[in-house]
Image (cartoon, rainbow, N blue to C red):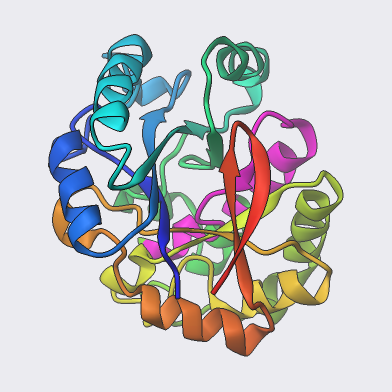
Amino acid sequence: MIISDCHMHTTYSTDGRSDMESMINVSIEKGLKTICFTEHNDHGAGFFENGDFIVDTDAYFEGYRILSEKYRDKIEVLFGVEIGLMEKELDFFDRYVRDYPFDFVIGSSHTAGLWDPYYPEYYTRFEDTESAYRYYFESELKRAGVYDCYDSYGHLDYALRYGPGKNSCFTYEKFADILDPLLSTIIKSGKVIEINSSGYKAGMNGPNPAKSIIKRYHELGGLPPTIGSDAHETGYIAYEFEAVEQLLKEVGYDSYSIFRKRKREEIKM
């Protein structure tokens, strides 16, 4: 049983729709034992120059500190962040994650170059969807090769969530020449990948990343992944975790990872 949700956003994130205390209370109702808030910091992404998706970390930490103490006898609440990996922001994020007492850091690629695959305009820049996905995975490989300040690589196939046809045209074999080095780089650096259940919500019939990516990650010797719903409101906390557990067991895992004070621990399912 998965009793930890380690990817959650509140109104401290630009796109969060539920406040922190509500998220905690619903997590308790759902029987979770550990949660980790991972508010967005996409510092350096050009289209966020107005401050969107850059959390006020001081205010966030103070809110977290008060509520984690208030509910300490009912649920463990951890302090995390989701950073938007950008090649030119390497030094900034190295300093940033040292300046705050994070338990857990997700490194996510919300862009390829300066373009966000969330927007349909991203795909019009390429001759076909496969080329758009390939460019995205190539960007991730570059970032995985230079970043060391994260713990888990978030929603590794993020672009599939929003591309034309979503993951219907995706097969691991089409992109193995990029994905094998990407997964190997993550594994060799001592990091893990995240299983993000919001893929089910997006109509992908599975999580991000796809089962074929998780399977290959396991074959290459990847440590147990972290698990997160990527919930931005209370209704999606621990979303489809039973399906995630079944998938992980089919691939060969009997545990998953959580991070406390940036140290990895394994939790049996």
Segment tinted magenta in the rendering: 136-161
Residue at 50 percent of width and 31 percent of height: 83
Q: Quadrant of the N terminus?
A: bottom left
Residue 38 in the figure: left or right of residue 249? left
Residue at the bottom extreme of this rendering: 250
Residue at 36 percent of width and 59 percent of height: 229
Give the vertical position of 59 relative to 157 (above or below): above
Identify which residue, 30 or 47, lies in the foreground: 30
Residue 200, image quadrant: bottom left
Give the vertical position of 239 relative to 194 (above or below): below
Residue 146 makes an appearance in the image: yes
Residue at 77 percent of width and 32 percent of height: 146
Residue 149 in the figure: left or right of residue 114? right
Q: Quadrant of the C terminus?
A: bottom right
Identify which residue, 207 or 87, lies in the foreground: 207
- Name the spot of residue 180 as percent of width and height, x first: 79, 65
Give the vertical position of 43 relative to 71 (above or below): above
Give the vertical position of 172 relative to 144 (above or below): below
Residue 163 makes an appearance in the image: no
Residue at 68 percent of width and 53 percent of height: 192
Q: Is residue 141 magenta?
A: yes
Residue at the front extreme of this rendering: 73
Q: Is residue 73 magenta?
A: no
- Name the spot of residue 205 as percent of width and height, x first: 37, 82
